[in-house]
Image (cartoon, rainbow, N blue to C red):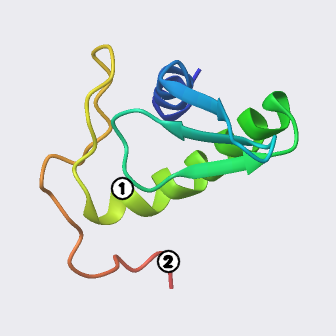
Amino acid sequence: MSLLTEYIEQAMCWAKIEKTEDGRYFGSVEGFQGPWADGDAEDECLKELRSVFEEWLILALRDDELPELEGLNINFGGKRCQKPVPVGN
């Protein structure tokens, strides 16, 4: 299992799903601001939340410092590529 997949799996342990007043479900991941999802059923909401979290995570890796989860650290340590490296000619 890749480090990124392990990180996502660990983050989903912190998923919080709540039933809203209108009978739908709202989900977020504790400790992360931004990713959320909703759905008609709890399992639908959780599935959507995982998908949203994966996409959000890829974007967040570019600019944000993400929390370490159970010893899993996927941050770049402040090193950023300033310009693309040419690949082949």
Near mark 2 (Cα within 10 A), the count class, few <14, some 14-19 or many ≥20, is: few
Near mark 1 (Cα within 10 A), the count class, few <14, some 14-19 or many ≥20, is: few
- Residue at image x 47%, y 23%? 14
| Residue 11 percent across, percent down from the top left | 47, 28
- Of mark 1 and mark 2, the one earlier in the sequence is 1
Is residue 30 or residue 58 the one in the foreground? 30
| Pair 1/2: label in front | 1
| Residue 8 percent across, percent down from the top left | 53, 31
Tell me the SS state at disc 1.
helix
Examine the rendered structure and indicate whether residue 80 appears above or below residue 3. below
Q: Quadrant of residue 1?
A: top right
| Residue 46 percent across, percent down from the top left | 72, 33
- In the picture as drawn, the residue positioned furthest to the top comes out as 70
| Residue 2 visible (yes or no) | no
The residue beneath circle 1 is 61
The amino acid sitting under disc 1 is: Leu
- Residue at image x 87%, y 43%? 40
- Residue at image x 53%, y 40%? 28
How far is disc 1 from disc 2 in space, using C-alphas?
26 Å
| Residue 38 visible (yes or no) | yes
- In the picture as drawn, the residue positioned furthest to the front comes out as 21
The amino acid sitting under disc 2 is: Gly
Side of 19 relative to 41 (left or right): left
Examine the rendered structure and indicate whether residue 61 appears above or below residue 67. below
The residue beneath circle 2 is 88
Side of 32 relative to 23 (left or right): left
- Residue at image x 72%, y 49%? 38
